[in-house]
Image (cartoon, helix red, strand yellow):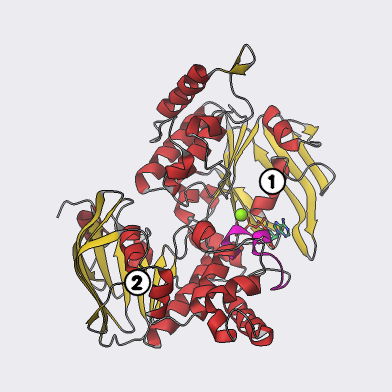
Amino acid sequence: MSEDTILEFRNVTKEFPGVTALSDVSFKVKRGEIHGLCGENGAGKSTLMKILAGVYPYGTYSGTVLYNGKELKLQNSAIQAAVREGIAIVYQELTLVPAMTVAENIFLGREPVERGSIDWDRLHSETRSILEKYRLDVRPQDVVRNLGIGQMQMTEIAKALSEDAQVLILDEPTSALSEVEIDRLMEILQTLKARGVTCIYITHKMNEFFRITDQLTVLRDGKVVSSQPTAELTPEKVVGLMVGREMKERFPRGARQPGDVILEVQDLHAEWAGREVLKGVSFALRKGEILGIAGLMGSGRTELVMTLFGEFANVTSGAVKLDGKPVQIKGSQAAMRHGLGLVPEDRKRFGLVLPQSIVRNISLANLGQFGGSLAVDEDSELAASTRMAQDLAVKAPSVQVAVGSLSGGNQQKVVMAKWLLSNPQILIMDDPTRGIDVGAKYEIYKLMNALAERGIGIIMISSELEEVLGMSDRVMVMWQGRSQGTLDTREATQERIMTLATGLA
Ligand SMILES: Nc1ncnc2c1ncn2[C@@H]1O[C@H](COP(=O)(O)OP(=O)(O)OP(=O)(O)O)[C@@H](O)[C@H]1O
Ligand SMILES: [Mg+2]
């Protein structure tokens, strides 16, 4: 192994019951480079990183991992061992303890101690200096439970940075970050690179690979299909390598004719915890229309759809009309009875029961279809859930396995399946393709088109402007709790949307 190779995988294979997650994986990572790792949902990215981080210790996989020229043999209590070896990881799923503060989470298990008890002053001042050094927008004493998911993700990153690692692994670190936060993270990574830190970077956002990585390894079905300098690649080539076929268009265009107005919102105001979160929102949604909602983090997008769904905020004034009739929706059960469905932003918290099977998770919101909650017709439940799981290409050994054992992206597909099966008249999707690979995104887009063609009205929140422009008929732009304007996507541009979203219009 040459001097400038810090890590080398040799024929690494990892099996789970019924699944070969990694098969003969071999590639090298150079010291000080930013090495991208990409592949479709379930390709094996997180599993490979968990081997490095000691979640799957030596002996639970076959093959060899060389680290600084020596075989890495992380034994039991392997996670601590990985930290000692200088390997830090930001997991795809958040691992923070919700009831603890930011400072307690960052130094969990290695708190500064003074005469046998925790030195709180030092804990807070050291946390503060990490947060300041990286200009992260949280406070040491904030309780994690009260943070937004973007802030939680930043805390998770701060925790890994505080370990002063030689190798920093980031598994989809930007899925919940705003543009500004992503820019900051990119700067941090450049700084670390200049200091000689090696970084392995996983994302489903193609532009981030081309912005930040030196080398790119592509996994497909647990095998390495390519490992080469990013400069030799193009996004199209990478997508082709990932999915094993060429993808000509990213956004399938449906031929549809929006019908009558099904939902009308007039000057909606709402408050939560004494704060006005919606300050006048008006729009109309037609049958068979896809309405995009764009806006920066904090613009009120999620607050709006949660309020429509009867959760979260209290409506203080304004009107919501369904089929021309004013309604007041209280709670998600009522929303569903009114024909609304919601694919929530935070799917872990609101979308899935992790220990339960794929079938049960998909049918959970729809037990009414299968004979009610007391006597479920298990055959039709199984048939319908299996069909949905297949339509979305959920990757799993069977539909009976626990949702918690699926890869991150595949868990999200299960949430989608659940709501698609519930046959709503209006389907609200909050960032539906976050963390989902290009191939599966395309499948979801096709499903959205099919639903719209059946007359369902779709509201789609998205942070990806390309997706908003590619998929919706019209886009409403929000800024500071208000609707700033609604544009026809045939005429809208990214610049025009950003102008409205930043309040410059
Ligand atoms: N603990 C586990 N038990 C059983 N199977 C698992 C477990 N962890 C992962 N798998 C399976 O191994 C395969 C690889 O999963 P992995 O999480 O590594 O994918 P990934 O590339 O990170 O995907 P994503 O982009 O969706 O996060 C998948 O088929 C997954 O279902
Ligand atoms: Mg993963």
Mark 1 residue CB less than 8 A from any atom of ligand 1: yes
Label placed on residue 50: 1
Residue 98 is situated, as x and y percent measured from the top left of the image, at 52, 43
Residue depicted at x 81% and y 43%: 64
Gap between marks 1 and 2 measured at Cα: 36 Å
Q: Is residue 152 left or right of residue 485?
A: right
Is 407 situated above or below 90? below
Mark 2 residue CB less than 8 A from any atom of ligand 1: no
Report the residue marked by disc 2. Answer: 459
Lower position in the chain sequence, tag 1 or tag 2: 1
Mark 2 secondary-structure assignment: strand
Image quadrant, ligand 1: bottom right
The quadrant in which residue 301 appears is: bottom left
Q: Is residue 69 left or right of residue 101?
A: right
Residue 48 visible within the image:
yes
Magenta span contains residue 13: no
Residue depicted at x 53% and y 54%: 233
